[in-house]
Amino acid sequence: SQTIHQWPATLVQPVGSPLSLECTVEGTSNPNLYWYRQAAGRGLQLLFYSVGIGQISSEVPQNLSASRPQDRQFILSSKKLLLSDSGFYLCACPRTFSGPYGYTFGSGTRLTVV
Amino acid sequence: GDSVTQMEGPVTLSEEAFLTINCTYTATGYPSLFWYVQYPGEGLQLLLKATKADDKGSNKGFEATYRKETTSFHLEKGSVQVSDSAVYFCALMNAGNMLTFGGGTRLMVKP
């Protein structure tokens, strides 16, 4: 079965510092991968998705970037964090067996920018 | 484009009360519909799904029926428990395998 690993689970970073969040996937190959952000008290916003190595699509303009250096690795980065980057970041990939089964999500990273 | 609209929360209920969380959608084609649940401090878990009109998804006492005529997928449970307290997200998946989420509804169940 598919499993998504995200780390770290929690992170407190000062404004202006860099960021690197990592997501790795097990149990599938060549998956589409997604980064979502959930700001406090709000819904899920799709930030980036990737259909393959080196292929990144951005859904919203922002201070963040994403990279996919390997088939099962998806990285979310920032050179200089802003207060507004605080939130709960989730990595996801589709669960595809014999039909659409939605997504498998990682356990998330809670980022607080201070 | 595709969109999902959920009732705003929080929804506060007493234990054993009946729960309905409304969800309506706008989409081209024939999307699959999902409910996800997020317990405090955790990621999202798939709660139930329906892939075509009139399908009923069910899990852990929760149910939702895919109503194409009203473009709805309301979540129901006959008797909620304190452990059901969480945020619930309605979502649809269309041809591109992209999930579109509603804004989420926080449910608080009091003993």
Image (tube, coloured by chain):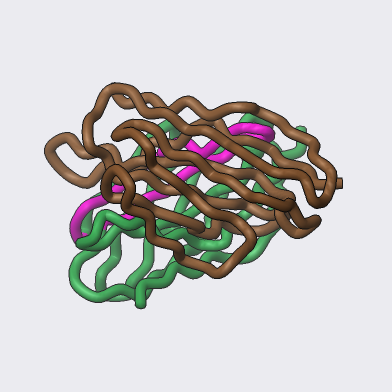
Chain colours: A brown, B green
Farthest-out residue, front: A79
Q: In this view of the protein, can residue A83 be seen by the observer?
A: yes
- Residue B104 placement (x, y as % from top left): 58, 56
Q: Please, which residue is most extreme toward the left here?
A: A98
Identified at 44% across, 46% down, the residue is A67
The correct choice, above or below, for A62 with respect to A54 in the image is below
Q: Position of residue B43 (x, y in %)?
A: 55, 36
Q: What span is in magenta?
A: B32-53
Instruction: Indicate whether residue B41 is drawn in magenta.
Output: yes
The answer to whether residue B18 is seen in the rendering is no
- Counting labels gives 0
Q: Toward which corner of the image does residue A95 lie, by quadrant?
A: top left
Is A31 drawn above or below residue B104 in the view shown? above
Looking at the picture, tell me which residue is in the foreground, B8 or A39: A39
Judged left or right of residue A12, residue B29 is left
Q: Is A101 inside the magenta-drawn segment?
A: no
Indicate whether A87 appears above or below A107: below
Q: Residue, x 66% and y 38% (percent of image)? A: B85
Residue A82 horizontal/vertical position (percent): 77, 56
A106 vs B3, nearest the viewer: A106
Is B5 left or right of A71, judged from the image as shown? right
The front one of B79 and B60 is B60
Q: Position of residue A91 (x, y in %)?
A: 47, 40
Q: Residue at x 66, y 42 (%)?
A: A19
Assign the N terminus of chain A to one quadrant of the image.
Answer: top left
Residue drawn at point x = 30 percent, y = 73 percent: B27
Left or right, residue B21 beside residue B110: left
